């Protein structure tokens, strides 16, 4: 399923889901269903593969991804939470980029299977380690729905006595045939250009990818469409609970600088992220929940 991984089955979770490990004991949930194949890791609550039977993979995983309990995985859908990018100065120095959810160990909470596909619930709860990094009690639920569509729902429940604010991204790495074959439409016209001091710029609602891009678009007013001429497919992306969509390609120099991405890796991926990045972030009152989703169909 993932050519560069050599896994051994250690347990059966349900008819189409098994627990498997690599030679270092790194745990994977492998889904082999008539309608689709998929894989995720409990480390990071990280979907690393999704492919409908007979079709191209929708999710991209770096061929040189590193599976290490202290690192984030390159590719898949990293869960950036409870901050996006560097931590705010109010939280202190030396905190990990994009938060700690993507490097935390999640627990498998529930699985449901049907002829259409599977739904997997993962949980991450605050603990002594997370409280050192971020002073709130929380329960985070990631519901991954894999069927004709791919849906990720990240539910943040505030279990502390005070309101919290969080920022986040479902940092989806999409598999593409080649940059010149794709056409992205439906984006907002206004975006903060991270490659130009986060200046607010105005562009077209359609985009061709022919250079590095790292832009935080204000939330789209319509569905986002990623047309891939070579794959002869169009993905439609619908996000909720977000205030922005991040579009990222590291291009030649960016890929070359990553130890966990082949030099040509940028040619087969594009990140389109359902994100909370604006202002102080999303507030969640004590005892309440907020849900961030992305749906790819
Ligand atoms: O979402 C875009 C971004 O924030 C970029 O600025 C880029 O560096 C990328 O994420 C990857 O971050 P990472 O920490 O996973 O290397």
Image (tube, rainbow, N blue to C red):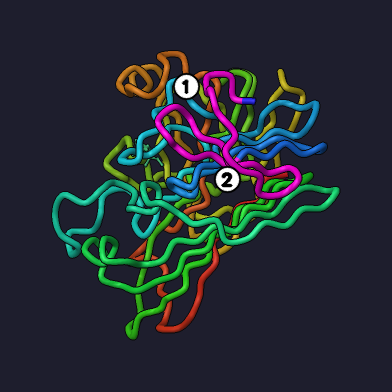
* Residue, far top: 264
Q: Which quadrant is the C terminus positioned in?
A: top right
Image-quadrant location for residue 109: bottom right
Q: Secondary structure at mark 1?
A: helix
Marks 1 and 2: CB-CB under 8 Å?
Answer: no
Can residue 190 be seen at all in this image of the molecule? no
**What residue span does the magenta drawing correspond to?**
2-29
Q: Look at 35% across and 40% down and name the residue there.
A: 69
Q: Position of residue 168 (x, y in %)?
A: 42, 56
Precedes in sequence: disc 1 or disc 2 = 2
Out of 179 and 174, give the one closest to the viewer.
Answer: 174
Residue ID for mark 1: 266
| Residue 212 visible | yes
Residue 129 x/y as whole percent = 26, 61
Question: Helix or strand or loop: what does disc 2 sit on?
Answer: loop
Is the residue at mark 1 in contact range of ligand 1, meaning its CB lies under 8 Å from it?
A: no
Residue 11 location (% of width, % of height): 61, 43
Q: Is residue 113 magenta?
A: no
Q: Which residue extends farthest right? A: 115
Report the front residue among 232 and 202: 232
Residue that label 2 marks: 187
Between the residue at mark 1 and the residue at mark 2, the CA separation in whole angstroms equals: 21 Å
Q: Along the horizontal axis of the image, is 113 left or right of 250?
A: right
Number of other residues with Cα within 10 Å of mark 1, as a class: few under 14, some 14 to 19, many 20 or more:
many
Residue pictured at 81% horizontal, 38% vertical:
35
């Amino acid at each position: 399923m993932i050519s560069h991984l050599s896994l051994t089955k250690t347990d059966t979770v349900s008819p189409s889901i098994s627990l498997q490990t690599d030679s270092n004991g790194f745990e994977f949930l492998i889904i082999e269903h008539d309608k689709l194949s998929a894989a995720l890791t409990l480390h990071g609550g990280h979907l690393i593969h999704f492919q409908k039977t007979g079709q191209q993979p929708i999710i991209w995983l770096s061929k040189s991804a590193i599976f290490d309990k202290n690192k984030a995985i390159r590719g898949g859908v990293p869960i950036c939470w409870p901050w996006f990018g560097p931590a705010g100065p109010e939280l202190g120095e030396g905190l990990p980029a994009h938060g700690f959810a993507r490097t935390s160990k999640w627990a498998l909470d529930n699985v449901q299977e049907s002829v259409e596909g599977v739904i997997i619930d993962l949980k991450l709860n605050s603990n002594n380690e997370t409280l050192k990094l971020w002073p709130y009690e929380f329960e985070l639920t990631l519901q991954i729905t894999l069927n004709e569509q791919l849906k990720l729902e990240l539910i943040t429940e505030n279990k502390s006595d005070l309101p919290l604010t969080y920022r986040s991204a479902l940092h989806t790495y999409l598999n593409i045939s080649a940059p010149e074959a794709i056409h992205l439409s439906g984006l907002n016209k206004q975006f903060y250009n991270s490659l130009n001091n986060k200046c607010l710029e105005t562009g077209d609602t359609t985009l061709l990818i022919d250079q590095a891009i790292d832009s935080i678009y204000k939330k789209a007013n319509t569905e986002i469409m990623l047309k891939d001429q070579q794959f002869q497919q169009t993905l439609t992306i619908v996000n909720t609970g977000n205030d922005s969509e991040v579009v990222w390609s590291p291009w030649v120099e960016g890929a070359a600088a990553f130890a966990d991405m082949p030099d040509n890796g940028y040619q087969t991926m594009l990140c389109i992220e359902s994100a909370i990045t604006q202002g102080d972030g999303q507030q969640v009152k004590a005892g309440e929940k907020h849900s961030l989703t992305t749906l790819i169909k």
